[in-house]
Amino acid sequence: MTSRTPLTLAASAGACALALGVAAPAVAAPDAEQKTAMVSVFHGIPGMTVDVYANGKALLSDFKPGTVTEPQSLDAGTYDIQIFEAGQNPDGTPALEKEVKVPEGGNATIAAHLSADGKPELTAFSNDVSKVDPGKSRLTVRHVAAAPAVDVRAGGQPVFSDLTNPNEDTAAVDAGTVEADVVLAGTNTVAIGPADLNLQEGTSNVVYAWGSANDKNLALATQKFSGMESTPNGVHAGGSGAAAASPNSSDAWLAWAAATGAVTVTGVLVARRYAGRRA
Amino acid sequence: MAAAGLAAATAAVLGVVLLPPGSGAAPADFGAGPPVHTAAVAGTPGAARQDAVPVREAPPERVRVAGVGLDARVEAVGVAPEGDMTVPDDPAVVGWYRYGPAPGSPQGSAVLVGHVDTDTGDLGEFAALRDVGRGETVEVRRAGAEPVVYRVVSRTTVPKDELPPSVFRRTGAPVLTLITCAPPFEPERGGYTANLVVTAEPVDG
């Protein structure tokens, strides 16, 4: 199990466009004029239900901590994201505000969360929705908690180490259900979990470690993207060649040869020639 | 004797002339095989399912094609380390690609694979697929669910490296896809170089 370089992107990251270029080709199809991106929002600030505005328009209301929205299609561009405590007048001063660039064809999650030292902030993450190898599942962990550096373990084995807020790490792992926990970096002191993660084949699974260590409300939230499966390289279902030369082959199997009247003899010759060649 | 000798000689010549060394003949194709392009039926990348509960499908236990005497136990298989679909070692056992749809699924291609023969020279249960004709009934028995019945609509032979990705599609019209190996047999290229692909459609209840 290898961990790769984090694909972390700051809210303003221009590199986003490149990283996301291969992401969801089908997304923009409905309207070629409007270059769009898929955007979801994660709320990871404990104890505060919020309303979310994008460029002054209501995007989400009564959004509760620990939840993540379904991705929605937004025009690519720059958005002024404002977070208000639920029901507050949006003309007032937002609890949080940040300009977020949404690149064309991209897939991003905007996370409202606590910084390592407990201050609310907004971070935009780009979601890797490229294909995964057959039999694999993509696991991404984002540290958005008011907590120190952590290691992430699956089945007791370290998958990611020394992950700090507001960063992420990602890896392709064998599909299946794993028991995951989060420990303080370099220790066996469990900070969150264990929790069962159902990592389905051909999916991308984003796990948010959120909350506050001081307030003892650290928790995990997951976001799943599907449709990233790829097909096996091939099917190798043969052995000695016996079936290629079987004397009781049907006419269909040896249709061409039947016309020559040489079916059986040819078959036998082929069989003799190669019998025992393979171990 | 002379005639027989001549026939054998002719056969030998034919074997050399008409067949590349080591190849047998593939069965005749019928029906429209699986589409080569899958873009239209591929899943929607980026579609998220939060807290999605995976649909628990009834796994297949046995596959029968009574018309050709095929009757094999089925076990769930995945992917080998090199990225190929796993095929059960036992030629009497058929593998179901567990990451794709299960037989009886309302959408996508449920894939069953079996060896055509083994390294020891035994014929596999799926060798019988070469005798399968259009309209043949395929029955799949499942754990904890009623058997599902399919009817064969096509049989095609394709070079292994051109096996259409659509045979592994997870969306689109439901089909059962049975795959084994087919001639040409070229030991220097690792054995069989083609796949026999039989496609069957569900028979409405």
Image: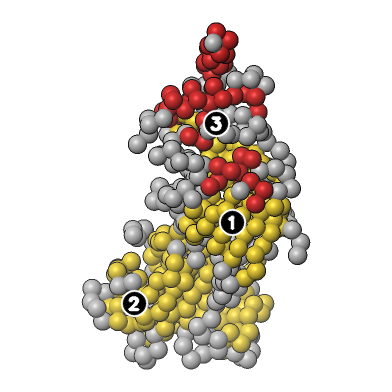
Where is A10 relative to B128, above or below? Answer: below
Q: Which residue is mark 1?
A: B63
User: Residue at 61% across / 37% down in the picture?
Assistant: B157
> Viewer-proximal residue, B91 or A198?
B91
Picture coordinates of residue B91, whole percent (x, y): 47, 48
Residue at image point 61% right, 87% down: A62
Amino acid type, mark 1: Val
What residue sits 41% from the left and 61% below the top?
A174
Count of numbered circles in the view:
3
Q: Are marks 3 and 2 on the same chain?
A: yes
Which quadrant does the C terminus of chain B fall into? bottom right
Q: Looking at the picture, how far across and down is residue A1, in whole percent?
A: 34, 59
Q: Position of residue A251 (x, y in %)?
A: 65, 31
Indicate the secondary structure of the residue bearing disc 1. Answer: strand
> For the residues carrying marks 3 and 2, which lies nearer the camera in this image?
3
Query: For numbered disc 3, what is the local secondary structure?
Result: loop
Residue at the extreme left: A187
Q: Toward the viewer: B88 or A162?
A: B88
Q: Amino acid at mark 3?
A: Pro
- Report crowding for label 2: few under 14, some 14 to 19, many 20 or more residues within 10 A (C-alpha): many
Pointer 2: what residue?
A182
Task: Check disc 3 and report the residue beneath it.
Answer: A247
Mark 2 residue type: Val
Q: What distance separates the C-alpha of mark 3 from that of mark 2? A: 62 Å
Q: Position of residue B182 (x, y in %)?
A: 55, 36
Instruction: Give the number of the mark in front: 2 or 1.
Output: 1
* Subunit ID for the residue under disc 3: A
Q: Residue furthest front?
A: B1
- Residue sitting nearer the eye, B79 or A59: B79
Say if labels 2 and 1 share a chain: no
